[in-house]
Amino acid sequence: MTCIYSLRNQNDEFPLKEELMLPSGFIFVFRMQPEGKKKTPPPLEEIINKLFTRRDNFQDIRARVKITLSKEGRKQSFLANLIFDSANRYRIEGLGFLNLPFFFLVDNGRQICLYFLEEGKLYKGKSSEENLFHLSGIKLKSQDLIAFFTGNLPYDLISSSKRKVISEDGKKMVVEFRPSDDFFYKVWIDKNKGVIIKIELQRADQKLHLLATFKEYRIIEGFNWPKHIECNFSESQIKLKIKYKQIFLNSSITEDIFILKNLPANLQVIDL
């Protein structure tokens, strides 16, 4: 009786076959990837268009994450619920003991609110980059906050035609975007996977404003998604680490979730 064992890489589309006859009469069939079949990375514009398409395909996102905040030698870690939608609205719920919320940061596009349950204080003001910075130390537009938290290109780069490759090798390329005279971005892109590795945001004076890195991509509902994101804000000296634990995409979020409800009557309200 003749037995045949096949050793095959399931990712090989057209494997070659080589047989080896052993003295026992068994035949091993080795299947090998043919030489010269390496994939050629797509050109810059194709990669950029895929990144833009990735962003456009997200209608909303729900996620459970672990957040670690560091500033001036102090560190705080906690679980959080993140909720984003395509209208650039967001809700961040910090979770404490028994996963009960201890703060809510909500921006519905018109108003931004920060509510601390234990202190009984609600900070509220117009939705703006300045008020987000005042409340959190993060100086970003709401749409860019969502972009950095989800491994997407910042909003301003979608309409920017001023872009060029400033360095490139076999695995990655570095692209410079200049959507404004006031600031510019450097984006490191994995050419084979078509995902973002790192983003630098620099002001016109060449000072680094933000450094963000994206690691351990995995497939979530057909999309490459970074499991670990780290953002360093030089102005506020805040280091922010995000570790994704659960992600749900396009689950039909309603706008009511971006409005704080059932607040206590004796709440102290502080206008920004």
Image: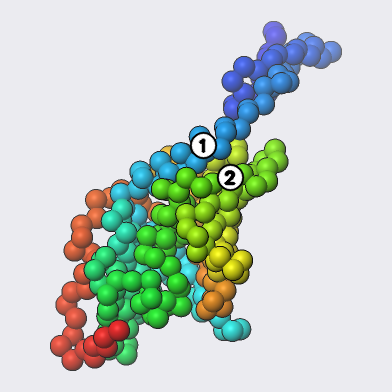
- The residue positioned 45% from the left and 72% from the top of the image is 139
Q: Mark 1 points at which residue?
A: 45
- The residue positioned 59% from the left and 27% from the top of the image is 11
| Lower sequence index among marks 1 and 2 | 1
Task: Give the x, y percent position of residue 203.
Answer: 55, 66
- The residue positioned 69% from the left and 8% from the top of the image is 1
Task: Give the x, y percent position of residue 7.
Answer: 68, 23
- Local SS, label 2: strand
Q: Name the residue under label 2.
A: 164
- The residue positioned 58% from the left and 51% from the top of the image is 176
- Local SS, label 1: helix
Q: What residue type is labelled 1?
A: Glu
Is 156 above or below relative to 53? Answer: below
Out of 125 and 255, give the one closest to the viewer: 125
Q: Which mark is residue 55?
A: none
In what quadrant of the picture does the C terminus appear?
bottom left
Is 5 above or below relative to 44? Answer: above
Q: Quadrant of residue 222?
A: top left
Out of 111 and 27, give the one closest to the viewer: 111
| Label 1 neighbour load within 10 Å: few <14, some 14-19, many 20+ | few
